[in-house]
């Protein structure tokens, strides 16, 4: 089997799934226009009342794509094409018919030296005469996400850590580091369980590009939690054909007993929340059907997010919880704010991020610059863990999203 044939075989499972969904979306596209309350467990040395951190990572949308029309936010309702023409961001159907290019190369095209006018040049960026990346949802199409934004905190300057796709950005949510990776491995299953021929491009410290097997052994926030005797779990799909679980790429976790005890199914999250037994830090990756990855339904994924937020809101842990709901990468969609270029691979484009907590600032749009590494920084700062010494050192810690002196907010059950 040639290298090209091997690569195509590796890509088959994930692409086949998304293509099957996309066939239905094509039909739709053709017919659719575009106090005591704050007392906390003394066994947890949290510096705030937040003792249970839940990080939910969805897929493939920019801030302007979901919240460009949100009042008070730094949003846009039009964008420039590579030709220089300014076009309106057209109303998006619930799902677009194809997966837009969002590789590192696509990101560079879209960024275009900071001009932010190349989103029509990404793979599938122009489809049947439509500029699919220049589309936009609104309150009517995503009412629940907008309801959370109106009641809690919406971050409008939260960027991805890497100018590129899912896997390196997922690694930043657990480690503030991707091992230098800036693109996905060449397969649908990523990490130490990848087929032997799988390779991931990285930039070495001396600036060289190498292709390596996507199994690393750097430290993560989970290791800092272990060292302090605190608890964590990754709740993720168990499908052996489709995988974006970053802990699978961390050898000392994948090959230890922690893999069985700490890396569990998404279903387990609801059982743990219902019993009031969520760990100090939960990472949650939804089943792919709920991921919002085009051509999948945005509203279907939104309903799954509501289910998760309701589970935490109705649990005994609500008063000590903070939910961070973010998206892994830009997905090929337009955003008007050029990201700061802090190193060779990032930052990437803005993505929506909601902070849902009784102590989140109410109805607040936070303009502070964050990135996926900020989630790790918040874990470190809030729980007094020290630092991993990677991007977390300079990242802002998301404390600007909270007011720990305010009267705690009641949950929003939708």
Image: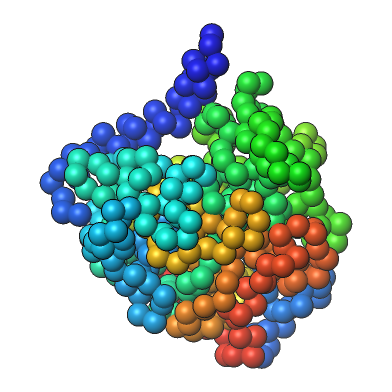
Question: Looking at the image, which residue is at 41% across and 31% down?
Answer: 15
Image-quadrant location for residue 144: bottom left
Q: Horizontal and vertical percent for residue 53?
A: 64, 65
Number of numbered tags placed on the structure image: 0
215 lies left or right of 340: right
Question: Looking at the image, which residue is at 54% across and 9% down?
Answer: 1
375 lies left or right of 364: right
Image-quadrant location for residue 294: top left
Image-quadrant location for residue 306: bottom left
Q: Is residue 208 visible?
A: yes
Q: Horizontal and vertical percent for residue 289?
A: 41, 43
Q: Horizontal and vertical percent for residue 165?
A: 52, 45
* Of 379 and 372, the residue lying toward us: 372
Is 127 rendered above or below residue 75? above
Question: Looking at the image, which residue is at 66% across and 31% down?
Answer: 211
Question: Looking at the image, which residue is at 52% across and 78% down?
Answer: 366
* Of 382 and 264, the residue lying toward us: 382
Is 341 rendered above or below residue 131? below
């Amino acid at each position: 089997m040639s290298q090209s044939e091997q690569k195509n075989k590796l890509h088959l499972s994930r692409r086949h799934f998304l293509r099957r969904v996309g066939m239905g979306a094509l039909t739709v596209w053709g017919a659719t226009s575009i106090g005591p309350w704050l007392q906390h467990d003394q066994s947890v040395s949290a510096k705030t009342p937040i003792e249970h951190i839940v990080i939910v990572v969805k897929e493939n949308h920019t801030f302007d794509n979901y919240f460009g029309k949100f009042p008070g936010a730094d949003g846009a309702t039009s964008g420039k094409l590579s030709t220089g023409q300014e076009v309106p961001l057209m109303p998006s159907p619930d799902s677009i018919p194809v997966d837009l290019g969002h590789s590192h190369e696509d990101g560079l095209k879209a960024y275009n030296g900071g001009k932010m006018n190349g989103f029509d040049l990404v793979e599938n960026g122009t489809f049947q005469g439509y500029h699919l990346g220049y589309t936009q949802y609104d309150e009517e199409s995503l009412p629940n996400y907008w309801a959370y934004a109106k009641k809690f905190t919406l971050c409008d300057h939260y960027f991805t850590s890497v100018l590129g796709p899912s896997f390196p950005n997922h690694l930043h949510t657990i480690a503030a580091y991707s091992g230098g990776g800036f693109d996905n491995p060449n397969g649908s299953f990523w990490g130490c369980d990848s087929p032997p021929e799988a390779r991931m491009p990285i930039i070495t410290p001396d600036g060289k590009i190498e292709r390596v097997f996507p199994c690393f052994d750097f430290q993560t926030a989970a290791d800092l939690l272990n060292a302090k005797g605190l608890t964590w779990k990754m709740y993720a799909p168990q499908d052996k054909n489709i995988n974006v679980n970053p802990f699978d790429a961390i050898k000392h976790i994948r090959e230890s007993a922690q893999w069985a005890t700490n890396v569990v199914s998404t279903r387990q999250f609801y059982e743990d929340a219902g019993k009031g037994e969520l760990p100090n830090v939960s990472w949650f990756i939804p089943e792919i059907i709920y991921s919002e990855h085009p051509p999948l339904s945005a509203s279907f994924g939104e309903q799954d997010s509501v289910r998760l937020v309701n589970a935490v809101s109705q649990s005994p842990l609500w008063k000590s919880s903070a939910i961070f709901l973010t998206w892994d990468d830009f997905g090929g969609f337009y955003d008007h704010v050029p990201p700061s270029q802090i190193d060779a691979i990032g930052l990437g484009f803005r993505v929506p991020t909601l902070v849902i907590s009784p102590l989140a600032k109410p109805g607040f749009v936070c303009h502070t610059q964050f990135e996926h590494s900020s989630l790790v920084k918040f874990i470190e700062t809030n729980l007094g863990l020290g630092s991993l010494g990677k991007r977390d050192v300079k990242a802002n810690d998301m404390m600007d999203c909270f007011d720990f002196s305010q009267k705690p907010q009641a949950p929003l059950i939708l």
